[in-house]
Image (cartoon, coloured by chain):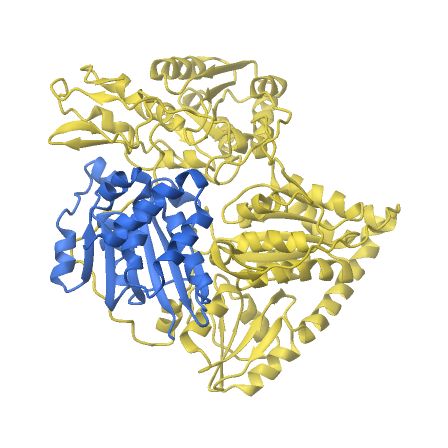
Amino acid sequence: MDTKGIVICGVGGQGSLLASKLLGRVLMNEGYDIKVSEVHGMSQRGGSVITYVRYGEKVYSPVIQTGEADYIISFERIEAARYASLLKEDGVLITNTQRIDPMPVITGAAEYPTEILDELRAKNVKLEAFDALSLAIEAGSAKAVNIVLMGQLAKHFHIAYDKWIEAIEQLVKPQFVEMNKKAFALGYEFTA
Amino acid sequence: MKELMIGNAAVARGLYEAGCQVVSSYPGTPSTEITEFAAEYDEMYCEWAPNEKVAMEAAFGASLKGVRTACAMKHVGLNVAADPLFTLSYTGVTGGMLVCVADDPGMHSSQNEQDSRHYAIGAKVPMLEPSDSSECKEFAKLGFEISENFDTPCLLRICTRIAHAQSVVEQEERVVPEVKPYEKNPAKYIMMPGNAIRRHPFVEERMAKLTEYAETSPINRVEMGDTKIGIITSGANYQYVKEVFGDKASVLKLGMVHPLPVQKIKDFAAAVEKLYVVEELDGIIETHCKNIGVDCIGKELFTPLGEYSQKSIAAAFGMPEKASVSADTVVPNRPPVMCAGCPHRGMYYVLAKNKITVLGDIGCYTLGAVPPLCALDSTLCMGASISGLHGFNKAGGAETEGRTVAVIGDSTFMHSGMTGLANIAYNGSNSTVLILDNSITGMTGHQQNPTTGYNIKGDPATKINLEELCHALGINRVRVVDPYNLDECEKALKEELAADEPSVIISRRPCVLLKSVKAKPPVKVDADKCKSCKKCMKMGCPAIHMENGKAAIDTTLCVGCAVCEQLCAFGAITD
């Protein structure tokens, strides 16, 4: 098979690290070669963050460039638009519709482009946009947005549901396992 | 057992499996996790040293005593540790010594993008460069063997895309080599002229032997494919090259980037039609090729700037970009910002309000430079705030002394701020230094330091008292303020700037992200009282935004620091 690419993007502190860990664990357990690339440091402080996940028989580059992503998972609306050009022509963009104002918007130096997802849709981008935050809160914590989004992504994979749950059990602290399983289920069941 | 590991964790695993016994480092992105992961193995002694020079010298001592040892740092950290490195090249080692250095092409979290390979050349020591996590582990282990076999410290160079990329690693058992007995050996270890003169020929002979090793070592590997294009590369660039070409080009992958082989390169060049060198940053392999009479294409095609990728390499070879779609509307930038409730914010607000000239330093507080605070005038390197302020005031005299300060964090002060402060006291500039003490090394992700009272394992340790230390360095006026109290900060700042002797203001409050810091309930805005003046937004708190023309608080971010409450002239913000 060709190497597949998944981009996970959002705002520093939103929990993209756990999402990429979960994805990495599930894909490794399926026997794929895999690389996950993330950037630590500066960008953790409320900046735009991006993680690349690539898997296949043999993976070389750890990064995803223009037109190479099969999926983009975005934790925030304009972050989805920021990295949309990484998507392949037939790729799928899954995004949380939550709005988090960046500092230039807060200070009034820039405006938040509220209609930007419609613009992408008009350009025939396959978009699955939904309020993952509400589902996360329903599951028990606003912090579970990452796992809700992973649930939505999992629908696109031919990997048994139980394998995802198994990986959640391995990665999450025992006291948070049930909440995250519920978040995953809510994301999985939701039709965006 | 197979595990998915970031390169840094794999280096730590390599240290563990190689039987390394002492690890001393100073944190710095993208190298920090090497030592954090190493500290999870109880069999190795690990520590955070006050700076990279101390770390490397501690590693030297452990090697002298006969055990395998390592230190880790970022590229600019190796500048700090360059002094011991250059003479360690002369002394060589007893126990194997690995110096891990992480470069940051693209400057994801750095002030420059210097190429550490120059240090291997300058110090005349070997340097290995892995290209994935599996090689990180293997090369770390090999580095110890090279160190011991050739009697030299060995450098292990990684870059951000290797340090922070996860790939699959096969784990093996730890094997501890026999500890070599300590024997006094002045000719080898006392580097005064008479001995050093006799060690220098050894260094040159060692380089010749290492070059022979580079000719035959399996880590310098030829992968023949189509012979129209031949590419010499290393590290992450190898992965990008393979991504672009697969077997449609032949590749000489260098695992050892110093010294470089001669015959191996000549043979490879002879086997391909056109030779390219793909290396991020400086054209070091290219220059070597040209020096040995091998024609190649390098920096004329590939930029010395930033990070490469499969995209940039394909573009350099004239291949078309892949099809993509993007929005036409411009997406506003999302730069990193100081966190909601960050204790640095209050002090920066006061500095900006009073239009103070601020010589800054390296850490989270460098973010005080960005809008809306724009509070910084300079940031150079670790410690340069204090020493730079001294020079600024010596040049400016009373004109600048009354309206210029240095700001430096607690960890950076211990790293290299102390000597600058001693200079202020000794050479008498009337300077005002602000130590922003947030009780942790923040930007690199919360590492302990000598002022926190804890060691790398989180166990209690001697806590150095900053007030007493400043007194001991010759500063009489030392006072402590709470940066959540704007009036107190402003009063202290004005008084100390007006004082006719040097002073230190310690702005003390722990980082809000520390687990030990309990957040207060978020503040509330009374929309009827809010006059929409936006004064609360002048300090750049990410938890405050405007909603329907009134200030609003993001309750998921706000930690109740109440600095905004002090800014509101209409009492619209309350606890």
Please report the residue visible at 61 percent of the width from the left and 81 percent of the height from the top. B266
Q: Compare residues A104 and B112 and report the one nearer the observer.
A: A104
Please report the residue visible at 27 percent of the width from the left and 31 percent of the height from the top. B543
Residue B351 falls left or right of residue B183:
left
| Residue A191 sits in quarter | bottom left
Residue A155 falls left or right of residue B444:
left
Chain corresponding to yellow in the figure:
B
Question: Is residue A146 something one can see in this rendering?
Answer: no
Question: Is residue B289 something one can see in this rendering?
Answer: yes
Q: Quadrant of the C terminus of chain A?
A: bottom left
Residue A8 falls left or right of residue A31:
left
| Residue B125 sits in quarter | bottom right
Q: Quadrant of the N terminus of chain A?
A: bottom left
- The image shows residue A112 at horizontal and vertical percentages of 17, 44
- The image shows residue B49 at horizontal and vertical percentages of 63, 37
Q: Is residue B515 above or below residue B67?
A: above
Chain corresponding to blue in the figure:
A
| Residue A88 sits in quarter | bottom left
Q: Residue furthest front?
A: A162
- The image shows residue B497 at horizontal and vertical percentages of 43, 17
Q: Compare residues B104 and B240 and report the one nearer the observer.
A: B240
Q: Is residue B269 above or below residue B533?
A: below
Please report the residue visible at 58 percent of the width from the left and 34 percent of the height from the top. B416
